[in-house]
């Protein structure tokens, strides 16, 4: 009995052991299948990562050019300094390398010494090293006969050769060459290229293996951008914005946009104050920087961050503002298109107007009123009551439909980051009678400058809303076009007939209306002033105004539109006609000739055209005097010699007709000087008289000088400056009675 039991137990144990063996083998087989088939890729990747060191190499970022292929942002070659501990085979060599790199790179010797003992043959110790430092390292290696242990790898650093030129538009890059603002950020995927890699094999104990086991995967350079911006136009705009900021003590920056009215190409976009993209984290406003530096430490960082954000912000795209009377060109277009008004329609202005019973009266800038006037005159007078009445004829529904059609209710989708949308009374366009009244004259709703210039271009080009864009082409490294940004018409907004009628009214406004300070002789300007008051008080303790002007030229075949606006002028004048219109005129005065646009003068303008100073050097005094007089100029002789040895103005220099040419007959006469008088705040006759008495020439710029109410506002050479007799001073004029 006992024996049978023992046999059965043995059989049972054998069966159990057999089952266990089968089970264990099954688990092992399952595990092997799982590891090799289902998880094989994962473990292969892990093994590869353990056996390989992967170092990223920056790609060369694409160059940004203006429309004429002038580089605006490019990548300069720099170097990454790499320590190679695996090749430092003695303490003496380690000492030499650490001492040398500490001195050349300004690094701590102790830290370098620790790094030099790592089990690695690739340890970065400094990035973005310039050529002069690279040369010192190469010289150090040569002098100390160091073939390995220190290595230089080519890298790239973003560089902006023109400094703060168009900086707000271009933006800047971060430490890893990624775009952080402006075009650099918006087109980052095209500009950044594809980084390369250095793969270094590791041995069983985790130490990097020699060069034989290293593989370099090359970088792929980024694409280049060709912008629509023209460097010359941009410079002209920036120069005149800076001058306007200084003259009018503008507290909250200024902006200007120039657009090709037919294609939507942005020819210039200037924002001041700006920054240097080579040093983007430096506050450029010295007064603001000093204020921040004097703050308590706990407040300083926040204030600095806010200041940097402000100087990086693209005011032309990211800020909304009340357009003011500039918007009246849009309201006029609505009325003419709907046929609720024509050029002969009359409006009566008593100085204010109540839009409805019980509403508060809305005033006109001319308190006594404009009386009865036709529609053209109402626009030229920028009469608020007339446009409120026009708004009532248009109606809330039609107003909002046109508002949307002109592109104000949506972003323009310009190829720049941070574009804001509008701030209308309601998302669905519902408006009260009072809302419609103030909207008709451009108040109490916010739009962006890029929306306004796009709407103005719609009127200028015959009624088509075009897509604004800043980039013209994307190019590869060989100059081949990867992508072309072609002109695109979104829709027709108004008829060509309506557009021409509004344009003619805006031209009349520049010649005989409130926009006279934007007048440029010979160039047929059309445009509208704007002055808008912000709600409440500014942080500067004064009422905030935005002074703007928007116009285009030539009015009979528009090529370019420009919007200029100054945020919070505090210099005493704040009307768009006094602050923005003169800046617009100065821009157009330089830009239009550069664009090759032909001058067509009126008879009055022809009479005042400049002459060229004749070349009289070497002639006898009598010959020189006759030659000067034949050119309708007055000769002044200094010295007792018989022949002319020099003259002022120089030969062929532009000089106003009736001006003075000073001829010198003795060397010592050339040393004589005169003081430039104060030429600001005077009439044309007074400026002429002072110039004659001071023995200098004056060249007039700005508004049409044949009309009344003209006063000098600027002079190119400051009062009291010592100059040679006959020197030409440019005096800018404006209409003092304009107040819109």
Image (tube, rainbow, N blue to C red):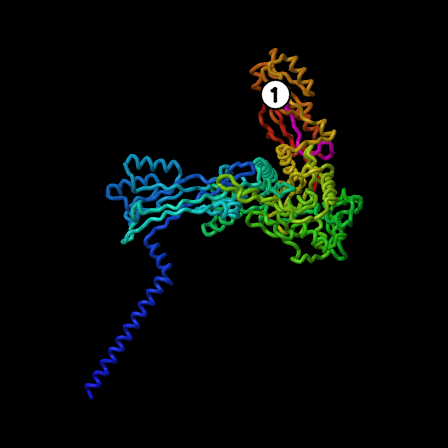
Classify 597 as above or below 630. below
Q: Quadrant of residue 103?
A: top left
* Relative image position of residue 184 (x, y in whole percent): 51, 45
Q: In which quarter of the image is residue 501?
A: top right
How crowded pointer 1 is (Cα within 10 Å; few <14, some 14-19, many 20+) is rated as some
Classify 626 as above or below 17. above
Front residue of 128 and 471: 471
Which residue is pictured at 27% across the width and 40% down the height? 96
**Residue 183 horizontal side relative to residue 424, left or right:** left
Residue at the far bottom: name it. Answer: 1
Q: Can residue 604 be seen in this view?
A: yes
* Relative image position of residue 262 (x, y in whole percent): 65, 42
Q: Is residue 725 visible?
A: no
Q: In which quarter of the image is residue 128?
A: top left
Q: According to the image, label 1 marks what residue?
A: 651
Classify 548 as above or below 3. above
Q: Give the range drawn in magenta.
A: 695-709
Q: Within the magenta stretch, is there residue 313?
A: no
Q: Check disc 1 and report its element: helix, strand or loop.
A: loop
Front residue of 334 and 731: 334
């Amino acid at each position: 009995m006992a024996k049978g039991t023992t046999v059965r137990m043995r059989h049972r144990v054998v069966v159990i052991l057999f089952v266990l063996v089968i089970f264990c083998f099954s688990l092992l087989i399952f595990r092997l299948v799982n590891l090799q088939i289902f998880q094989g890729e994962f473990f292969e990747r892990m093994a590869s990562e353990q056996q390989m060191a992967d170092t990223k190499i920056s790609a060369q970022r694409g160059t940004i050019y203006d429309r004429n292929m002038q580089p605006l942002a490019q990548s300069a070659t720099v170097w990454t300094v790499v320590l190679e501990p695996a090749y430092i085979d003695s303490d003496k060599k380690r000492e030499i390398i650490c001492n040398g790199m500490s001195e050349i790179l300004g690094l701590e010797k102790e830290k370098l010494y620790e790094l030099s003992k790592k089990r690695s043959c690739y340890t970065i110790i400094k990035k973005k090293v310039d050529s002069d430092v690279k040369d010192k390292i190469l010289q150090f290696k040569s002098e100390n006969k160091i073939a390995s242990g220190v290595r230089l790898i080519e890298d790239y650093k973003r560089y902006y050769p023109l400094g703060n030129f168009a900086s707000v538009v271009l933006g800047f890059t971060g430490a890893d060459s990624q775009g952080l603002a402006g075009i650099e950020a918006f087109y980052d995927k095209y500009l950044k290229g594809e980084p390369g890699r250095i793969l270094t094999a590791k041995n069983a104990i985790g130490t990097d293996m020699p060069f034989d086991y290293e593989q370099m995967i090359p970088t792929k350079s980024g694409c280049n951008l060709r912008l629509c911006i023209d460097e010359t136009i941009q410079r002209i705009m920036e120069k005149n914005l800076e001058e306007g900021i200084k003259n009018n003590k503008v507290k909250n920056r200024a902006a200007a946009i120039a657009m090709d009215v037919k294609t939507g190409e942005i020819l210039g976009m200037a924002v001041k104050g700006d920054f240097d993209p080579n040093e983007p984290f430096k506050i450029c406003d010295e007064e603001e920087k000093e204020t921040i530096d004097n703050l308590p430490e706990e407040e300083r960082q926040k204030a600095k961050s806010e200041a940097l954000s402000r100087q990086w912000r693209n005011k032309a795209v990211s800020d909304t503002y009340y357009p003011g009377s500039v918007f009246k060109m849009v309201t006029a277009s609505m009325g003419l298109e709907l046929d609720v008004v024509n050029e002969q329609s009359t409006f009566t202005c008593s100085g204010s107007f109540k839009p409805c019973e019980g509403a508060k009266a809305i005033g006109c800038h001319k308190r006594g009123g404009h009386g009865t006037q036709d529609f053209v005159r109402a626009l030229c007078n920028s009469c608020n009551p007339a446009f409120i009445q026009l708004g009532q004829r248009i109606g809330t529904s039609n107003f909002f439909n046109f508002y949307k059609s002109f592109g104000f209710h949506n972003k323009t989708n310009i190829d720049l980051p941070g574009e804001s949308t509008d701030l209308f009374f309601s998302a669905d366009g519902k408006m009260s009678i009072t809302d419609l009244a103030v909207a008709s004259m451009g108040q109490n709703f916010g739009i962006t400058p890029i929306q306004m210039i796009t709407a103005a271009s719609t009127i200028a080009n015959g009624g088509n809303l075009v897509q604004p864009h800043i980039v013209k082409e994307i190019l590869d490294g060989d100059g081949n076009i990867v992508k072309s940004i072609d002109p695109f018409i979104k829709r027709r907004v108004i008829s060509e007939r309506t557009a021409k009628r509004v344009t003619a009214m805006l031209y009349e406004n520049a010649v005989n209306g409130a926009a006279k300070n934007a007048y440029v002789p010979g160039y047929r300007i059309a445009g509208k002033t704007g002055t808008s008051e912000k709600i409440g008080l500014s942080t500067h303790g004064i009422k905030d105004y935005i002074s703007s002007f928007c116009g285009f030229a030539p009015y009979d075949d528009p090529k370019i539109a420009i919007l200029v606006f100054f945020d919070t002028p505090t210099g005493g004048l704040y009307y768009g006609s006094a602050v923005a219109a003169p800046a617009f005129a100065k821009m157009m005065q330089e830009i239009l000739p550069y664009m090759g646009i032909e001058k067509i003068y009126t008879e009055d303008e022809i009479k005042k055209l400049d002459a060229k100073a004749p070349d009289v050097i070497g002639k006898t005094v009598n010959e020189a005097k006759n030659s000067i007089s034949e050119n309708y100029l007055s000769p002044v002789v200094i010295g007792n010699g018989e022949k002319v040895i020099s003259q002022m103005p120089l030969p062929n220099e532009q000089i106003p007709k009736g001006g003075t040419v000073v001829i010198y007959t003795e060397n010592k006469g050339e040393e004589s000087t005169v003081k430039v008088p104060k030429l600001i705040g005077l009439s044309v006759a007074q400026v002429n008289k002072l110039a004659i008495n001071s023995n200098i020439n004056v060249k007039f710029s700005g508004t049409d000088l044949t009309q009344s109410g003209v006063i000098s506002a600027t002079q190119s050479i400051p009062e009291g400056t010592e100059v040679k007799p006959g020197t030409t001073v440019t005096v800018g004029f404006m209409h003092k009675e304009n107040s819109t």
